[in-house]
Image (cartoon, grey):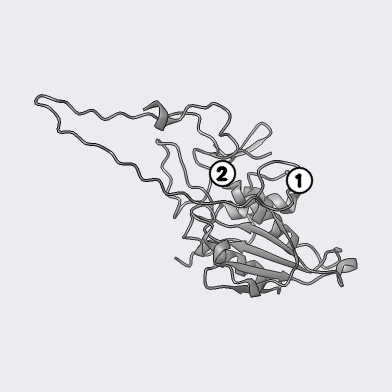
Amino acid sequence: RICEPRDCTPFPLHTPPDDRMLKGLEPKELWQAFESLSAIPRPSNKEQKVLKWLASIAEEHKLEYKQDAAGNMVIYRPGTGRGENSAPIAIQGHVDMVTEKHQHVDHDFEKDGIKLMIEGDWVTAKGTTLGADNGIGVAAAIALLRMPRTASLPPLECLFTVDEETGLTGAKQLDGTLLSAKTMLNLDTEEWGSVYIGCAGGGDSILQLDAGFEECGEGARSYKIRCDELKGGHSGIDINTGRANAVRLE
């Protein structure tokens, strides 16, 4: 279970087994990939390091890969075993993550990797967001790419998109010629164990309000009000839980 609370620095393809926080978790290949990914800074619009790491994985396993002008990358794994002649499947996840931390935590999301922790049954992070959205989807795709050639898998087109969190930029600017698959599995989901078919889409709204201002009277005082340390949550799936909202409280 998972909870959320452009230099050329090389990153290891595999975290050394003795240093792995997540050693012992299964499936091993998934968690190894997630731990290696978590060591790489990857805020939105600054995904160069993780894209370079993905390219190194493709080269390590002698897999073809392509990138479009937006930065999206597709790594191609040919079909093997009983899936050799099957229709290709696209596997999609986004490489950027939400970058939030507790006020007292010293962490630079552009330079520092995520410090993973295990608390009971949960994989979490020390004082920051975990990045499982969508790091666990990216890790699943990597685990598939690394499977032995004896595995029965259809041809895979693993699509890694950029800048999902701040505007779906990668998806909007995707060069569709990179993909030939007619079926795509998106690994960025909201509910464990659920499969969604189709999408309701989304939209943007711009609201303009006429605000009236008045001069402060003589002797008026100004105050700064701060409201923090609330529980927080996801603006989508936690919208109906009745949690306190700092904007409304102030």
Which quadrant of the rendered structure holds the N terminus?
Answer: top right
Q: Is residue 68 left or right of residue 104?
A: right
Q: Which numbered circle lies on residue 26?
A: 1
Figure check: 8 above or below 167: below
Determine the image quadrant of residue 59. bottom right
CB-based contact (under 8 Å), mark 2 and mark 1: no
Which quadrant of the rendered structure holds the C terminus?
Answer: top left
Determine the image quadrant of residue 168. bottom right
Figure check: 160 above or below 107: below
Q: Nearer the viewer, residue 16 or 165?
A: 165
**Dot 1 amino acid type:** Glu
x and y percentages locating residue 224 in the rendered image: 26, 30
Q: Nearer the viewer, residue 14 or 135?
A: 135
Secondary-structure class at tag 1: loop
User: Which residue, given by chain and number where applicable, does mark 2 sit on?
Assistant: 130
Figure check: 160 above or below 117: below
**Dot 2 amino acid type:** Leu
Residue found 54% across the figure and 26% down from its top: 242
Residue found 40% across the figure and 36% down from its top: 103
x and y percentages locating residue 88 in the rendered image: 78, 68
Figure check: 132 above or below 52: above
Q: Is residue 89 left or right of residue 60?
A: right
